[in-house]
Image (cartoon, helix red, strand yellow):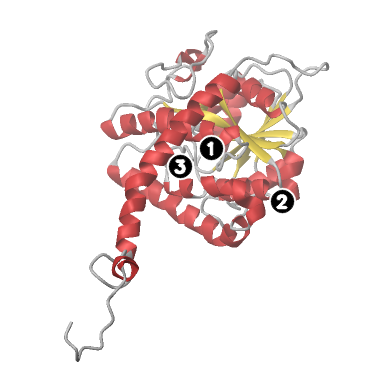
Amino acid sequence: MSPGSSSAPRSPAASSCGTGRNAVSPIDVLLVFLAFYPVVTGAAWMVGGVMFRLTEERPRAVDPPGGLPGVTVLVPAYNEEKVIAGCVAALRLVDYPELEILILNDGSTDATVAAARAAAEGDARITVVDDGVNRGKADRLNEGMRQARHDLVLVTDADTHLHSDAVTHLVRRMLRSPRYAAIAGCPRVTNRGSVIATMQMLETASLIGLIRRTHALAGRVGTVAGVLGLFRRDAVLAVGGYDPKMATEDIELTWRLLQAGHLTGFAPNALVGMQVPETLSGIWAQRTRWARGQGEVLRTHARTVARPKHAVMWPIAPGGVLPTRGGSATPGTAPRGVAETPESLRDEDVPAPCDAPHQTPRPIRL
């Protein structure tokens, strides 16, 4: 250094974290996050799946002395004339002692009501509720919750086929703890005639199954989806029910139940057959709606969830960018195979776990 220079020597710290060549930029942080997040979470999900298998999936066949409690099934339907008969046929095969089934028509403009009534004829457990008004799915479900005769309420979609033992598996999981307010079922993709549908089948059976198992270990399943979920009616009504302003009202309701101090669980053997989009445009529309809905949920609940007392919910928040809902095809479409005889749903075998994509349970093969 020349005698006339007034510059001070730079410290190593200044050269590594300031504005020099070795400075850490936001892009660097983002790249590190993107590199490690899949590895860390993937490992956590695999470990969680194994732990759930070892600790939670062992049989606990201890029913209450008075038997299993009654259950009300809610099936919201809007313009589902092509699929509602298959859904009702599967519901008629459900093996459960005390069941009330409400088909909630939401002002359909097609022959949904006629098809539902024809399929339900002769079964006193099934009631088709129709007031001719279109109120939206959330309002219909809230109305159904209030009408339900039983405290345990099962929600499923009109284009699904419920396994005959699904209700029993859900109820037994719910009865493990009075803190449970909701239990998610296990959807299985039944239309596998395209590469896109097959990819979603693998996604649902493996990735989503592992994520839900991991979250269920802490009683914090982040989404009890409308495709199949069992709820305690009083808990749902106490938090205000489904929010009709939300695009993904099922996610938002689940988060409010968790914030209220309830637990949410997962029953991997409670199977339901569902249809998924088979085209790129269909899956794009579905996932775009999910992403928009998750964004609404995050914006609505970010401040509350960020509080330390809700720290147990932090791990499930990033899951909103993943398709952990398990959803069915676009309402009003004609899924492949629904016209086949419902006798194909009969089976005496124990259903395969949700994370075994190579084992296709015959009860939900259409």
Of marks 3 and 1, which one's residue comes earlier in the chain?
A: 1
Give the answer, above or below, for where 30 lies relative to 179: below
Q: Quadrant location of residue 63?
A: top right
Of marks 2 and 3, which one's residue comes earlier in the chain?
A: 2
Inspect the image, locate mark 2, and give the three-letter code of the amino acid beneath it.
Val
Q: Which residue is mark 3?
A: 331
- Tell me how far mark 1 sits from mark 2, CA to CA: 31 Å
The residue at the point 55 percent across, 42 percent down is: 223
Q: Is residue 157 visible?
A: no
Q: Secondary structure at mark 3?
A: loop
Disc 3 packing (10 Å; few <14; some 14–19; many ≥20): some
Give the answer, above or below, for where 67 lies relative to 203: above
Tag shown at residue 81: none
Inspect the image, locate mark 1, and give the three-letter code of the amino acid beneath it.
Thr
Residue extending furthest top?
Answer: 348
Judging depth in this view, the residue of 31 and 102 nearest the camera is: 31
- Count of marks placed on residues: 3
**Is residue 126 found left or right of 350 in the rendered image?**
right
Judging depth in this view, the residue of 327 and 344 nearest the camera is: 327
Q: Which residue is mark 1?
A: 112
Of marks 1 and 2, which one's residue comes earlier in the chain?
A: 1
Q: Which residue is mark 2?
A: 239
